[in-house]
Image: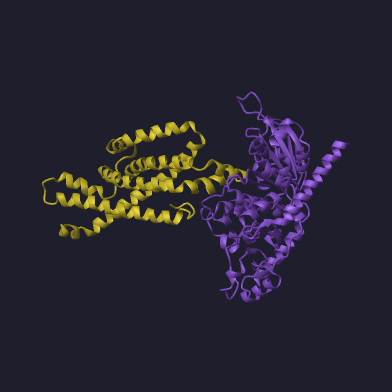
Amino acid sequence: MTATNETQSVGQDAARNSEVSGAEIRLEGVVKRYAGQKTPAVDSLSLTIPAGEIVMLVGPSGCGKTTSLKMINRLIEPTSGAISIDGKDVRKQGHDELRRHVGYVIQGGSLFPHMTVEKNIAIVPKLLGWDASRISDRVDDLLDLVGLDPAKYRKRYPRELSGGQQQRVGVARGLAADPPVLLMDEPFGAVDPITRQRLQDELLSIQRELRKTIVCVTHDIDEAIKLGDRIVILQEGAHVAQYDTPENILAAPADDFVSDFVGSGSTLKQLSLARVNEIDLADWTTAAVGDSAAEAIRKAQTVGHDAVVVLDNRGRPVAWPWLRQLRNEDRIPSYDPEKLHTLDSRATLNDALDTMLTSSHGGAVVTGDRDQYLGVIDFTSVTDHMRTLEQQAAAATDGQARG
Amino acid sequence: MWQFITDRSDQIVYNTLQHANLVIQAVALATVIAVALAVLITRVPRLSGLANALSAIGLTIPSFALVGLLLPLAGIGATTAFIAVTFYAVLPILRNAVVGLQGVDKTLLESSRGLGMSELTSLWRVRLPLAWPVILAGVRTSMQMSMGIAAIAAYVLGPGLGGYIFTGLAQIGGANAVNYAVVGTVGIVIVALLADLLLLLLGRLTISKGIRA
């Protein structure tokens, strides 16, 4: 009963939030000069970040990207210039009040080790004076959103979580009071590559649902290309070298600095632009945890599948066992979902190839919003799609050369 | 010996409780003072060197001397004893509190600011809880030390078990001299062990499971 109610409320939230909930951020002639330094760390940065988009600030270390980010929530006070969120000057609000309405996520999640997951997430709602039952509902909803089972993780302490789980809780904490703007500082820098890819996928999935304005600092151009609706490439002193969509930056780098930074092999980087959802997914035999194993095997064999995708009671894939692994079972057992490496439908083809190479199935399970099962992607369909893209690119360059 | 104790059991129990009472109150007050000072010191880094120097010098003042110095100000009796014990009790707690507060991860502090905690909320909900294990270790050291110092306080007729030790010393060679000294000393050791156990328990109750060793 409770489970059904929860699922319903989650569904309603998703529907309600599917329009843009973000706010526009504007920086005008922002300067940050530290005492005793000749050149300013940020030298007259002007930038408009559209509502509901992910904008990646990327550049070499020391280019002022983190300083620029921290000026938005006034962790660093600008020396001059103006910053506004949704048309309101940030300096006109008290800095504590401002920060409670701007989500902030940093590397590793930076959770408070003496507080449980629940308490960590509840910090901002508590500061805003929400009542206990509203906070409790919100914590459940957020844990669900970032793919952690509330019943299992609420009462845990950060040291009982893996790096990826801590980072997920960090994101949930940043989103706790439903802020229109989320600032992220190298959020996925401290985790291993596989976890990082998964967290990136999840962020894209969350953003599809929430449509916040997200400003994210990274030094990794591949991450910027994957996550960003737009990318700001910054040079020393936070000079904007180029501010454009990933497609345009890859196709037409503004100058040598940008093309150096983006790096060679940019046709290969095009792979980071193509998403899994551009490819038709194959249907696969599915079974729910607790179903009859014999029945599932029979279903799979009739369509010639040698494995079954197992879904949990919320339709999330948890495992992809071979039929021979199921023969000794009466019912489909429950699995640890952490062991199955899934792909979000917004994942790039690069990620898809990575995932497939590590999977013994020569394919990967694809998920949509809230990790719902969508289908299976296989190796041939990816390579076919890549070939089409290459041919298109070649045709386009030919056309340019002739024109 | 046994006879000696049973004859005076009421009085011994009374003095033991008095001893414990004096020390626990003094250490409690010292904790508040030390933590408040430590918060001030960590906010104004220039004070840190000064505080270290003062607490080092403070520990070198013989407790007898301090009691003597306090006499003209606070007179004979419990007040002088209380002030003297509190003074010494502050020092180890202060050191640990400064180390504990300074040891809180800077990124966590920035995180707390980034979430919109005020300075005071951040102190109360992040810095103190994270520094608490180290502060409490200081409180334990302080409690042990104060048990002995409180014995000296009996010199100015302060409450507690110290009186037995002084009586024993005064009657050296007399029939009960050793009995007096032993009752005073063993009594203090027992009170000290019990108090330490109590603090250990307090730690169990007040240190978050997320940071317990």
Placement of B164 over or under B91, stated as above or below: below
Horizontal and vertical percent position of residue A51? 77, 46
User: Is residue A46 in view from this perspective?
Assistant: no
| A247, B68: nearer the viewer | A247
| A283, A1: nearer the viewer | A283
Residue depicted at 27% across the width and 46% down the height: B151
Placement of B100 over or under B47, stated as above or below: below
Please tell me in which quadrant of the rendered image residue A219 appears: top right
- Where does the N terminus of chain B fall, quadrant-wise? bottom left
Placement of A48 over or under A153, stated as above or below: above
Which colouring convention does the figure follow?
by chain
Horizontal and vertical percent position of residue A349? 71, 51
User: Is residue A112 in view from this perspective?
Assistant: yes
Question: In the rendered image of this protein, which colour is used for chain B?
Answer: yellow
Chain coloured purple: A
Please tell me in which quadrant of the rendered image residue A256 appears: top right
Please tell me in which quadrant of the rendered image residue A338 appears: bottom right
Horizontal and vertical percent position of residue A192? 58, 48
